[in-house]
Amino acid sequence: MSYRIGQCMQCGFCYAYELPLPETYEKYYRTLSKYDHPLNQLSLRPVDQARIAKTLELCLPHLSPDAQISDIGCGFGALLNAFKIVGFTRLHGIDPAPASAITAKNLLGLEHIRTGSLRDASDQLPLAETDLLCLTGVAEHLPCLSDDFSNLLQELPEHAMVFIEVPALERFLSPPAEAYGEFSLEHIQYFSIETLTELMANFGFSPQTLTLCELQGCTDSLFGLFSRHPQAVIAPAPAMDGLDDYLNYSESTLEKGLQKIVDCGAPFAIFGAGSHTARLLPRLEQLGLTAKILAVVDNNPNLRGKKLGNFMIQPSNFLITLPACTVLISSFNAQGAIARELAGSHPTILLYDLDE
């Protein structure tokens, strides 16, 4: 799975192109999901708790107590459960991860979670009766964005509202910023306040509210509540760093990390088999370092036994068979946690100078 990055010269929208087929993405979310393995309700990261809290803050003033809420890409139902806690009962969701529906039922008592993709939503969700449609962390994943939104939004009643959360292009360079981290295997559409507003206007929706939200542990989010009957005046979008600025920063940061690998000189195992490593392997090949890679390991059980490039992904306990082996931690957000996991057992290469 790979792609190129482009930008529309007329509207400024940034997007990925030369994409794999949509069916490839659907298979990825079904079989390699990292979103359907909660241990319990307390396993929600603080950043996800903050995103849910912001969603409720923006949506609740516009909802009646009997509102029907549909959530696409609902995972195991954390957002729907938050609506349930404050009194809403007409709750429906859909997610491609096979374990999501049963987890939502067993863990949270949510009965109306279905398994499927956005393209299944019209058959699996009561869209014609939906008062609020939630698309949090969804739009940036869609390879056929315009077609998918067109087909989806036309199913909604005239009064329905649409709540969208996406990573904010305005904040790609807000520290700490991961080198090329916004260009993951999954994130293939890139939104600013201006371009999200223009996208929704194409389908007859205008913002009731738009806000940038600072988050700890991930890219700051752009939250928007849209309807066919806007009731608010939206402030002009703030000045933003260009995509070129982010690309220049990313290349400079990555080169510093690569130099650490070169300086190490020793054979190494890679801990992490996600987008970060998918971007890293071609650069290691260019430097002639792939022959030094002893193994690729990951904690995600859905990845074990799969191949990443020429490497079979092993469980992290595979490192027991490589005593004292140097481990390259191929992760930005989890670098500190993995380093603590390995403390005392393996020397590590940390690509990023983070305060953790």
Image (cartoon, rainbow, N blue to C red):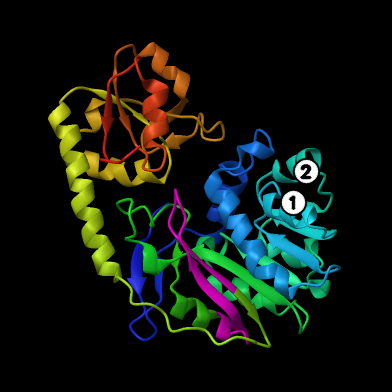
What residue type is disc 1 on?
Asn
Numbered-mark total: 2
Position of residue 313 relative to residue 241, above or below, is above
Q: Is residue 164 above or below residue 76?
A: below
Residue 120, given in percent of the width and then of the height, sits at 72, 62
Instruction: Tell which circle, 2 or 1, labels the residue nearer the N-terminal end.
Output: 1
The residue lying at 58 percent from left, 77 percent from top is 209
User: Where residue 123 sits: x, y (%)?
Assistant: 79, 64
Q: Residue at x 28, y 25 (%)?
A: 348
What are the residue bounds of the magenta stretch?
A: 200-224
Q: Secondary structure at mark 2?
A: helix
* Label drawn at residue 212: none
* Residue name at image x 56 percent, y 35 percent: 302
Q: Which residue is mark 2?
A: 108
Instruction: Kindly indicate the quadrant of the structure image that contains residue 15.
Output: bottom left
In the foreground, 330 or 308: 330
The numbered mark at residue 81 is 1
Regarding mark 1 in the picture, which secondary structure is present there? helix
Whether label 2 touches label 1, CB < 8 Å: yes
Q: Residues within 10 Å of mark 2 (few under 14, many from 20)?
A: some
Q: Residue at x 68, y 39 (%)?
A: 41
Q: Is residue 37 visible?
A: no
For the C terminus, the image quarter is top left
